Amino acid sequence: MPNTITRARIELAINWLAVVLAFCLPLFRRGVTITASLIILLWLLHAPWPDIRRTFTRLTPLLALAIFIFVNLISLLWSDNIADGFAYVLKYRYFLVLVALATTLRPKFRERTVVSFLSGYAISLGWSYGLAFGFFHFGKGSIDNPSPTMLHLDYSVFLAFTSLLIFNHIVSRSMNWKTRSGWILFLAISIGGLFINIGRSGQLAFAGTLLFLTTMLLCSRPVLLVLASLLGVVFFLVTVYWTVPSFKARFDTGVQEISGALTRQEFNTNQGKRVAGILVASGIVREHPILGTGVGDEMVEFRHRIDTHHPELHEAVYWFPHLHNQYLQIAVQLGAVGLIALVNIFVQLFRFRSSRPEWKRLATILGCVFLIAFVGDPFFHKQLTLVLFSLIGGLILAEKGNPSWSESAPAGDSLD
């Protein structure tokens, strides 16, 4: 067990690594892997376990995460592919970044980490615009898919969440008109980046969360003002639809593909394959409604059901590496118990009480973005989006999870 001085040094190292991780997250996957692994390793060396146990009982979001992981691990008892299942659960190790930051982050490092993240994000955003307009051609993206460092679905979640983070900052802070104008310009560029990219999961998450956030911000105002504001948000989204050709084309294509799958059984399209996956997986859920197949068996059972019940869907979805939907993935693996454990994480996050309303709203934004985006992919099982959730979740919970953080401590949250 490290002594007090050594523990303080390790804690400081974790804090600085959080700043580095935040910068790398939108830009360098390898940097994310190395930095996140170092945070986890140092935290495991540092952790005062009696205090950690008390922290878990006090911070219900951490307890909810622990329950979710426990359900995943216990499901290996009825899985026929324990090795594959354990490898799958092992990817959830990045949740330890959340626990590490929640229990070690110092007040002044919350600001530093956010600034670092926004700096890396701004570089990524400029890179994306450069790809979209053909100014340069390096990285993973292209003119048609200007996601510079990661898959377009993952990048869309980053764009959606960070746009709403900036919006939350604007509506939460007092600032002079020059500063506010700069933040509004940053927000406009960020939203533009979201809609020139092709990830529909993030676009849907942004629209849904913005509507909910607008209602939450104005809930104490006159009803007519709330309705007018919601109509304004809808008008903005409709305007984007009619003025951004790539977004309009992707939206229209998605609607047509879903309609074709439902009415004409046209499953060999992007959205048609998702409908086919739901069709196959729903049969598995009916057979294993409470506890699921167990982690590791889900794709084996998925392919077996195609062979025995849906051979016509073989070409469309037999190759699926996962079910392209977080809720469906968990329902097949863990049944109703797993879905309850998953949703409980977000229920506890929404219930978290921060001393600063801005951070309480950010918890709501984080939860809403992921809950909506989960319809498009299992983002809790993809490294970059899982680390994004863990990083921001750790920042949110730190004021209650770190014993050295007191209500009287300097908040260190000004980005102005």
Image (cartoon, rainbow, N blue to C red):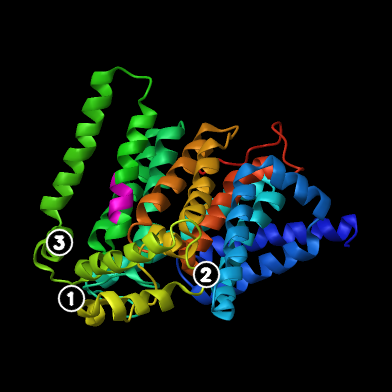
User: Magenta part of the protein: which range?
Assistant: 203-207
**Which three-letter amino acid code belongs to the residue tagged 3?**
Leu
* Disc on the earlier residue, 1 or 2: 1
CA–CA distance in space, label 1 to label 3: 12 Å
Q: Nearer the viewer, residue 372 or 141?
A: 372
CA–CA distance in space, label 3 to label 2: 29 Å
Instruction: Classify residue 316 as left or right of residue 164.
Output: left
Give percent across and percent down for residue 145.
Answer: 26, 72
Identify the residue shown where x is 62% and y is 64%: 74
- The vertical placement of 132 against 241, above or below, is below
- The vertical placement of 180 against 247, above or below, is above
Instruction: Classify residue 341 as left or right of residue 400.
Output: left
CA–CA distance in space, label 1 to label 2: 28 Å
Q: Residues within 10 Å of mark 2 (few under 14, many from 20)?
A: many
Q: Nearer the viewer, mark 1 or mark 3?
A: 3
Callout 1 touching callout 3 (CB < 8 Å): no
**Which three-letter amino acid code belongs to the residue tagged 2?**
Val
Q: Residues within 10 Å of mark 3 (few under 14, many from 20)?
A: some
- Which labelled disc corresponds to residue 295? 2
* Disc on the earlier residue, 3 or 2: 3
Disc 1 target residue: 268
